[in-house]
Image (cartoon, rainbow, N blue to C red):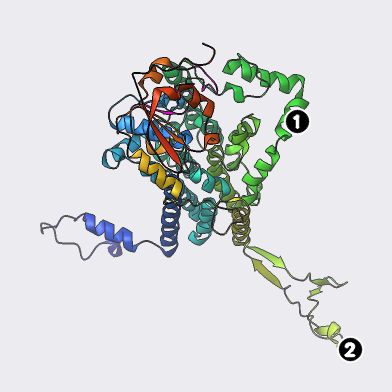
């Protein structure tokens, strides 16, 4: 057993130097020099993605391409939070967290202390969406056994139509779901339960309806990994949704949800539960009505666009991809047109499970497969020879003497997984060309020119409005004037439009708020806003300045506001 001894060990009693832990610098150097080529390419792709979409978003924003919904309202809300004020967003007449329980926005508040600008929102959105490729890569390299194959899958994620369009749809906290849900699924697949807990909690912080993807994830975990963790995920997600809706949202705006009207077959006055029961009743008593609804208005086309970039490879082993099933179903069930269009943020949350599910299915395939090119020929005596080989009697040996040589049939090794990834990459590329907002696509893109005359003219007049003044402005102006306690999208508050707990499309005047408005900024073109509302109140305002595109008015408080129509 002497070979097991360490002959270089110091003699008994000799001083032994303690092991020295690597310094931070050494650890960083080890990490940097340990980065593989595929990892470096992935990092470059993600950085390029974030830069490209952040720049495009900012160009569109500064070209007046963003709007109150859904850019200015988040900007005002986060700005108010950064000042320690209650986030009552006057652009929509609701508390920010009463509209949606998007507590994830609290993470952006410190950045507003340093740089209070909409650019924080657009950069955070692009960074979160771009980071969604990381869990795809991490799982792919383990499941597929190749970082380069994983890299193709991660790149395919970034060019999916739902990813790019969400990035350009103003700003939505839903953008964080791509990376949070992606890492939660990855952690579940890899048994990383601390990571799983962190990202499930982060996903819940994005929105009250994140449970639509987390509950199916919990079911998968319960069946495939741990029933205890799965059950905790399901119960925790449902409990959070209930508290978010019936405690937080109802406590802040008086109702648990404003979207009951999106449920098909609902009637005026229905609550969420009653509207849901009507769907169940229709499915049981008249299922053809439900089927007709799900087939109508391009809903199947939406499902095609969502799944075609994955070449339906996830069907080989669909359990992980099925985590997105409930989200996709509720999207096509909704009567809200935007919800089943791939160009809007509702689609993004389904992509992580589809992407990781595709990798999961490809990983179930053989890495390689031997394919015979020719079948061996069997002789009557039971011997066999290859068709391409003539030996013995078949070679013309009249005596039939000598042994019959048997050649092994020719075969070729097919890299099954590599081919599947190639199909995935090709489908992703074709899908991006057809439907994504990418430079190589067929979709005509709006890049935005920040220095266009329309935008420059708007900025000239915006500078004349005091920073703390109460302003009612056109919806293209509000994203650039949102950092104030009171700002309204004209004609609100003179007539409430898209305002209040229920988002009234056409409501009455809000007298106390209307009396506080000091400035009104509108386009010169009268068909670009509700001109009749302006004609009703214009006598109480004086002209401040105007140019070829915009007009700025200031309230003359010596003249009372004319009464609203019908009063």
What span is in magenta?
485-510
Q: Which mark is residue 14?
A: none
Place of residue 505 in the rendered image (x, y in percent of width and height, measured from the top left): 55, 23
Residue 37 visible? The answer is: yes
Q: Which mark is residue 398?
A: 2
The majority secondary structure of the magenta stretch comes to loop
Asked whether 529 or 86 is in front, the reply is 529
The residue at which mark 1 appears reads as: 292
Residue 333 shown left or right of residue 561 in the figure: right
Measure how far apart labels 2 and 1 are at the Cα level: 76 Å
Q: Which residue appears at 30% of the width and 25% of the height? A: 85
Q: Where is residue 384, by image quadrant? A: bottom right
Place of residue 244 in the rendered image (x, y in percent of width and height, measured from the top left): 45, 23
**Label 2 crowd bin: few (<14), some (14–19), many (20+), radius 10 Å:** few
Residue 201 shown left or right of residue 375 in the figure: left
Q: Is 50 included in the stretch rendered in magenta?
A: no
């Amino acid at each position: 057993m002497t070979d097991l001894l360490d002959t270089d060990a110091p003699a008994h009693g000799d001083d032994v130097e303690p092991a020295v832990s690597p310094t931070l610098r050494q650890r960083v150097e080890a990490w940097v020099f340990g980065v593989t080529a595929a990892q470096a390419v992935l990092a470059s792709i993600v950085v390029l993605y974030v830069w490209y979409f952040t720049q495009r978003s900012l160009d569109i924003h500064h070209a007046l391409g963003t709007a109150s919904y859904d850019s200015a309202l988040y900007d005002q809300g986060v700005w108010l939070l950064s000042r320690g004020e209650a986030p009552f967003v006057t652009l929509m007449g609701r508390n920010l967290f009463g509209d949606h329980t998007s507590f994830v926005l609290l993470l952006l508040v410190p950045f507003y202390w340093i740089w209070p600008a909409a650019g924080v929102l657009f950069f955070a959105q692009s960074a979160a969406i771009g980071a969604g490729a990381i869990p795809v890569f991490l799982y792919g390299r383990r499941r597929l056994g190749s970082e380069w194959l994983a890299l193709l899958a991660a790149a395919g994620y970034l060019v999916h139509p739902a990813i790019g369009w969400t990035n350009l749809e103003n700003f939505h906290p839903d953008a964080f779901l791509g990376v949070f849900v992606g890492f939660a699924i990855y952690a579940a697949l890899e048994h990383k339960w601390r990571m799983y807990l962190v990202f499930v909690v982060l996903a819940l912080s994005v929105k009250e309806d994140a449970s639509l993807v987390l509950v199916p994830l919990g079911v998968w975990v319960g069946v495939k990994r741990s029933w205890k963790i799965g059950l905790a995920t399901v119960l925790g997600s449902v409990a959070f949704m209930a508290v978010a809706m019936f405690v937080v949202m109802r406590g802040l705006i008086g109702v648990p949800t404003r979207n009951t009207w999106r449920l098909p077959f609902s009637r005026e006055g229905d609550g969420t539960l009653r509207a849901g029961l009507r769907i169940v009743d229709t499915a049981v008593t008249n299922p053809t009505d439900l089927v007709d609804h799900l087939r109508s208005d391009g809903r199947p086309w939406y499902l095609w666009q969502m799944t075609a970039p994955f070449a339906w490879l996830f069907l080989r082993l669909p359990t992980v991809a099925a985590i997105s099933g409930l989200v996709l179903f509720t999207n096509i069930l909704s009567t809200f047109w935007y919800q089943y269009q791939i160009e809007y943020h509702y689609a993004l949350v389904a992509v992580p499970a589809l992407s990781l599910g595709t990798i999961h299915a490809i990983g179930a395939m053989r890495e390689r497969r031997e394919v015979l090119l020719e079948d061996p020929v069997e002789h009557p005596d039971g011997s066999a020879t290859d068709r391409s080989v003539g030996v013995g009697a078949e070679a013309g040996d009249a005596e039939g003497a000598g042994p019959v040589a048997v050649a092994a049939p020719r075969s070729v090794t097919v890299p099954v997984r590599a081919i599947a990834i190639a199909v995935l990459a090709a489908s992703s590329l074709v899908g991006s060309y057809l439907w994504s907002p990418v430079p190589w696509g067929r979709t005509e893109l709006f890049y935005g020119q920040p220095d266009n005359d329309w935008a420059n003219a708007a900025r000239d007049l915006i500078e004349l409005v005091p920073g703390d003044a109460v302003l009612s402005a056109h919806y293209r102006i509000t994203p650039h004037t949102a950092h104030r306690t009171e700002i309204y999208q004209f004609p609100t508050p003179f007539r409430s439009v898209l305002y209040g707990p229920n988002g009234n499309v056409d409501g009455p005047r809000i007298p106390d708020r209307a009396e506080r408005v000091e400035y009104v900024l509108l386009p010169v073109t009268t068909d670009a806003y509700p001109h009749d509302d302006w004609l009703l109140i214009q006598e109480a305002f004086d002209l401040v300045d105007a140019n070829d595109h915009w007009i700025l008015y200031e309230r003359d408080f010596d003249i009372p506001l004319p009464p609203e129509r019908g009063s």
